[in-house]
Image: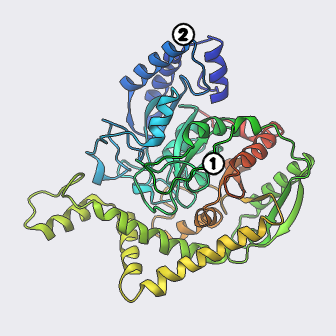
């Protein structure tokens, strides 16, 4: 059962081959057996899962249908879930139980999903390795000595290890696509505003976006269908009709124009990954796509711009965690200033403190124009590059990451080296574009992903290309040894 995709589970439940309750019990037992090796979950919700599974079975018995009805998933632990700890991977929120459900959680629950638990993540989603979590690092099931990527590493590791078929995740600078690449999954960052951020604890509000992590593009289409849509509670949500993503999966790629940016193939890219990217291009050419070299001239400025904008927004968003209203509070504060200082100093980890300080500096008087305002201007140049490129092509293709997953601890002493691993993913967040990573091969036994980018609200196009690619390759079917 644990090898089934979401699509296969939907068919099995519809054909009454098994019940949601039976499937849920199998997966909960598998998590209990295997997750101690991975550390992919922060909280398990057995009672909730079994009650939701029974309710889903009752709904099916009464004639209700739906691709997600009875499907087991997990939520990244920054989606608020009513009455359940929502920690954001931080000591600061270790004791916080959300008083309401995030819109994503509520929508998926209404569709009949079964919540197995909350997955581990980099603290407040700040990281590319899932090593900054208060609850310890997550291990990559393909090699337990390597990182699974971040910040959605818990969701990625759990799905890759076949502990569950799919999970929710979030992407601020690549935190869905990079873990997908490192663990041989398909991960989709939707257009900014496509999925509600209400109840999703913010890191950088103009960059954060929720999306699905699964083994196939078909499964991502199913999960995104349940997540997407306008939400009046979210001022950044866009009132745009949600198409039937599954219906567009089988479209022909004949004549599809795919752009390959020349800037992607610089000295920083592992040549073995470059070769796998070129192999993917050839595969898509066989399916009728037309390949064209394009240029994204301002890509080189994206990382410095991102690492000004994101910390600046984080310093503002995280100011609410002060030891006064909720979350961690230091013991016996001498006065209000001592309460603020020690609660934040003891509650936040090193990476979060580092980014808060960088952000506060960039926003301070005398430096706002020099750093933050300039970064926003670069952001516009990055967006303009994409708009010009999409006048020539329908999809942009390139590597998801410059290197395969590194060893645990390898970049802990050099945060900038870790930041540079986001070079291919952050541009989509700066521009607000949809992006998808799909499995494309292996380097030294570790998975490698290829990234697709599309114009605004063209998630269906990304899923179509990835699905057709997966019908003609088998990378996405490979399973890590021991799982």
- Evaluate whether residue 207 shows in this view: yes
Of the 4 image quadrants, the one containing the N terminus is: top right
Q: Is residue 240 left or right of residue 151?
A: right
Determine the residue positioned at 35% across, 44% down: 86
Q: Position of residue 462 (x, y in %)?
A: 73, 49
- Sort mark 2 into few (<14), some (14-19) or many (20+) by Cα contacts within 10 Å: few
Q: Which sits earlier in the primary sequence, circle 1 or circle 2?
A: 2
Element under label 1?
Answer: strand
Between 339 and 477, the residue placed more toward the observer is 339
Residue 188: assigned label: 1
The answer to whether 245 is drawn above or below residue 440 in the figure is: above
Residue 271: assigned label: none
Coloration mode? rainbow
Between 164 and 64, the residue placed more toward the observer is 64
- Sort mark 1 into few (<14), some (14-19) or many (20+) by Cα contacts within 10 Å: many
Element under label 2?
Answer: helix
Residue marked by disc 2: 61
Q: Position of residue 251 (x, y in %)?
A: 83, 40
Q: Residue furthest bottom?
A: 366
């Amino acid at each position: 059962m644990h090898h089934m995709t979401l699509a296969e589970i939907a068919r099995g439940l519809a054909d009454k081959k098994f019940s949601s309750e039976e499937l849920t019990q199998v997966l909960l037992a598998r998590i209990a057996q295997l997750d101690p090796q991975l550390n992919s979950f922060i909280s398990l919700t057995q009672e909730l899962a079994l009650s939701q599974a029974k309710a889903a079975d009752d709904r099916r018995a009464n004639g209700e249908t739906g691709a997600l009805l009875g499907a087991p998933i997990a939520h990244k632990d920054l989606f608020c879930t009513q009455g359940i700890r929502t920690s954001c991977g931080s000591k600061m929120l270790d004791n916080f139980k959300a008083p309401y459900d995030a819109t994503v959680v509520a929508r998926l629950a209404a569709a009949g999903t079964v919540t197995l638990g909350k997955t581990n993540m980099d603290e407040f989603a700040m990281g590319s390795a899932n090593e900054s979590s208060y609850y310890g690092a997550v291990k990559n099931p393909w090699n337990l000595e390597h990182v699974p990527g971040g910040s959605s590493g818990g969701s990625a590791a759990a799905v890759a290890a076949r502990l569950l078929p799919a999970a929710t995740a979030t992407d601020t600078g690549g935190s869905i696509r990079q873990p997908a690449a490192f663990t041989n999954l398909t991960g989709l960052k939707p257009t900014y505003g496509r999925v509600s951020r209400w109840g999703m604890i913010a890191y950088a509000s103009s960059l954060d976006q929720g999306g699905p992590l699964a083994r196939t593009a078909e499964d991502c289409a199913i999960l995104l269908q349940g997540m997407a849509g306008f939400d009046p509670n979210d001022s950044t949500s866009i009132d745009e009709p949600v198409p039937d993503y599954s219906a567009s999966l089988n479209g022909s790629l004949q004549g599809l124009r795919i752009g390959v940016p020349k800037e992607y193939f610089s000295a920083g890219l592992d040549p073995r990954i470059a070769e796998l990217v070129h192999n993917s291009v050839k595969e898509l050419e066989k399916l009728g796509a037309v390949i064209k070299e394009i240029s994204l001239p301002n890509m080189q400025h994206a990382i410095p711009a991102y690492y000004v904008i994101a910390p600046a927004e984080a310093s503002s968003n995280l100011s609410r965690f002060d030891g006064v209203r909720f979350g961690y509070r230091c013991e016996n504060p001498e006065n209000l200033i001592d309460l603020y200082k020690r609660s934040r100093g003891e509650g936040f980890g090193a990476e979060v403190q580092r980014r808060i300080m960088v952000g506060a500096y960039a926003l301070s008087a005398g430096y706002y124009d020099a750093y933050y305002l300039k970064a926003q201007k670069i952001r516009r140049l990055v967006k303009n590059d994409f708009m010009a490129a999409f006048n020539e092509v329908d999809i942009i293709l390139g590597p998801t990451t410059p290197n395969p997953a590194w060893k645990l601890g390898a970049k802990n002493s050099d945060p900038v080296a870790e930041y540079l691993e986001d070079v291919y993913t952050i541009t989509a967040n700066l521009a607000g574009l949809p992006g998808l990573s799909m499995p494309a091969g292996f380097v030294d036994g570790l998975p490698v992903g290829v990234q697709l980018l599309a114009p605004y609200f063209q998630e269906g196009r990304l899923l179509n290309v990835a699905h057709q690619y997966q019908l003609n390759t088998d990378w996405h079917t490979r399973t890590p040894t021991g799982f």
